[in-house]
Image (cartoon, grey):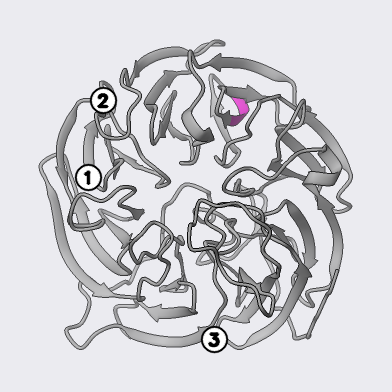
């Protein structure tokens, strides 16, 4: 293992009680933000983008990857991939060879994008879509928790980048790398770091966040899937929701004890449990590319199916067949891209489709057409696979686009067309986004 570090100062941290993550009110310290719910709560933002274009606070060269940034305490954390000299990406993105290279965890100064430190380690890739890491780091109490594509879990000092502890999922749990790599965004809960791993009895594992010691492990599945672990309260009880291709499960976050399991009649095809499970009142919503949607009522001790998709297909779909986007659920309606880029509105209580448009995704029917959706007040910020940042209002009546600007150039060609498939972060009245060549920070403040 090769490790390289440089050092700088770290500003003081404040404990955010809901997620037990160290944040300020305007930070984005983990997947989907401070409360892990895809909501940006800052105000004082632009109503429309200026005709003169976006104002870039900084642009910094970066290696390739799908890892979204995390922002905390005046710093930005992200992962990337560096190919070894003489190595090339395969022409067929589905092929699984052995590609030499390294992974990096980078810490940037939020004010100017200057790289403050980096942690780099050897990591040969064996996955399909081998551009780079998938996971957004989690920042907590002066530590950075990152998970690489091949299962390298690291805990780093957020100030210096010094390695505190590390785990190797393949070695520790005797498992193989999933087709598209390890991609479940780690969840910090109290003294625990909860991770999606895989294998027999270890699909979900909780570690002591300070030492890396295993606290408990649970569940078995032929494939672990890719959906991040989430903690919600249902029926007055805190429940860890873990969705893998064979079932959706509720566990006690403290012990790993299984409260209930809802098995699928047929496993999710190709292991594609990817979008984040979402809470809506006492209901839980799940969506996947081939198998479609499932809405469960969790008001009692056992789950009850409210509605579910009947068609297992990528084209002949019903409900919502989202590939990787986490939907937005608002006032009883679901908004999200479907399998071929149809951005759809559904009634949450029945799954009935209300409208669809290709405007915020790929502009036309494209397999895996995509856009990330983040709520901000009575509107949404969408980041399309074309690299466009969009302000829109989403309602049962229609998709209403307010403003659009090019944020980044799409440069990842794995799906057969140029795309950006990395989730941005929103903090400090700014957006932070990356493609396979650079990371940018753009001010979205109304008074900029």
Question: How far is mark 3 from mark 2, CA to CA?
Answer: 44 Å
The local secondary structure at tag 3 comes to loop
Quarter of the picture containing the N terminus is bottom right
Of residues 58 and 23, which is closer to you in this image?
A: 58
User: Which is in the foreground here, disc 3 or disc 2?
Assistant: 2
What are the residue bounds of the magenta stretch?
A: 237-242
Task: Kindly identify the residue that appears in the image at 75 percent across and 86 percent down.
Answer: 8
Quarter of the picture containing the C terminus is bottom left
In the rendered image, which quarter is residue 239 located in?
top right
Across and down, in percent, residue 334 comes to 29, 37
Image position of 157 (left or right of 18): right
Magenta stretch, main secondary structure class: strand
Which disc is residue 111 wearing?
Answer: 3
Task: Kindly identify the residue that appears in the image at 48 percent across and 27 percent down.
Answer: 268
Sequence order check: which comes first, mark 3 or mark 1?
Answer: 3
User: Which is in the foreground here, disc 3 or disc 1?
Assistant: 1
Residue 112, can we see it? yes
């Amino acid at each position: 293992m090769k490790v390289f570090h440089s050092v700088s100062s770290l500003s003081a941290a404040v404990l955010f009680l809901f997620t037990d993550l160290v944040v300020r009110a305007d930070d984005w310290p983990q997947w989907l933000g401070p409360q892990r719910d895809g909501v940006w709560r800052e105000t004082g933002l632009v109503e429309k983008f200026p005709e003169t274009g976006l104002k870039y606070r900084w642009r910094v060269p970066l290696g390739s990857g799908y890892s979204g940034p995390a922002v905390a305490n005046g710093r930005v954390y992200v992962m990337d991939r560096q190919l070894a000299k003489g190595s090339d990406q395969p022409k067929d993105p589905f092929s699984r060879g052995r590609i030499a290279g390294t992974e990096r965890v980078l810490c940037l100064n939020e004010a100017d994008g200057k790289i403050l430190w980096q942690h780099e380690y050897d990591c040969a890739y064996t996955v399909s879509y081998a551009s780079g890491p998938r996971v957004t780091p989690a920042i907590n109490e002066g530590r950075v928790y990152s998970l690489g594509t091949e299962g390298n879990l690291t805990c780093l000092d957020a100030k210096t980048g010094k390695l505190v502890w590390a785990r190797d999922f393949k070695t520790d749990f005797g498992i193989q790398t999933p087709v598209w790599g390890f991609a479940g965004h780690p969840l910090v809960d109290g003294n625990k770091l909860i991770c999606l791993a895989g294998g027999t009895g270890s699909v979900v594992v909780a570690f002591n966040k300070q030492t890396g010691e295993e606290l408990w492990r649970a569940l078995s599945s032929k494939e672990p899937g890719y959906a991040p672990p989430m903690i919600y309260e249902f029926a007055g009880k805190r429940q860890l929701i873990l969705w893998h291709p064979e079932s959706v499960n509720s566990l006690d976050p403290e012990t790993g004890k299984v409260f209930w399991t809802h098995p699928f009649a047929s496993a999710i095809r190709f292991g594609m449990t990817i979008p984040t499970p979402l809470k809506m009142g006492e209901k839980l919503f799940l969506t996947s590319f081939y198998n479609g949607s499932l809405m469960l009522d969790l008001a009692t001790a056992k789950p009850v199916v409210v509605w579910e998709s009947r068609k297992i297909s990528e084209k002949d779909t019903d409900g919502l067949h989202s590939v990787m986007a986490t939907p937005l659920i608002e006032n009883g309606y679901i908004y999200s891209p479907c399998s071929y880029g149809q951005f759809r509105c559904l009634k949450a209580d029945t799954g009935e489709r209300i409208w669809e448009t290709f405007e915020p995704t790929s502009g036309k029917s494209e397999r895996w057409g995509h856009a990330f959706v983040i709520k901000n007040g009575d509107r949404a910020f969408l980041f399309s696979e074309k690299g466009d940042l969009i302000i829109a209002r989403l309602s049962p009546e229609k998709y209403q686009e307010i403003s659009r600007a090019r944020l980044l150039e799409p440069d990842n060609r794995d799906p057969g067309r140029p795309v950006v498939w990395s989730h941005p972060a929103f903090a400090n009245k700014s957006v932070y986004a990356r493609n396979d060549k650079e990371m940018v920070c753009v001010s979205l403040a109304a008074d900029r």
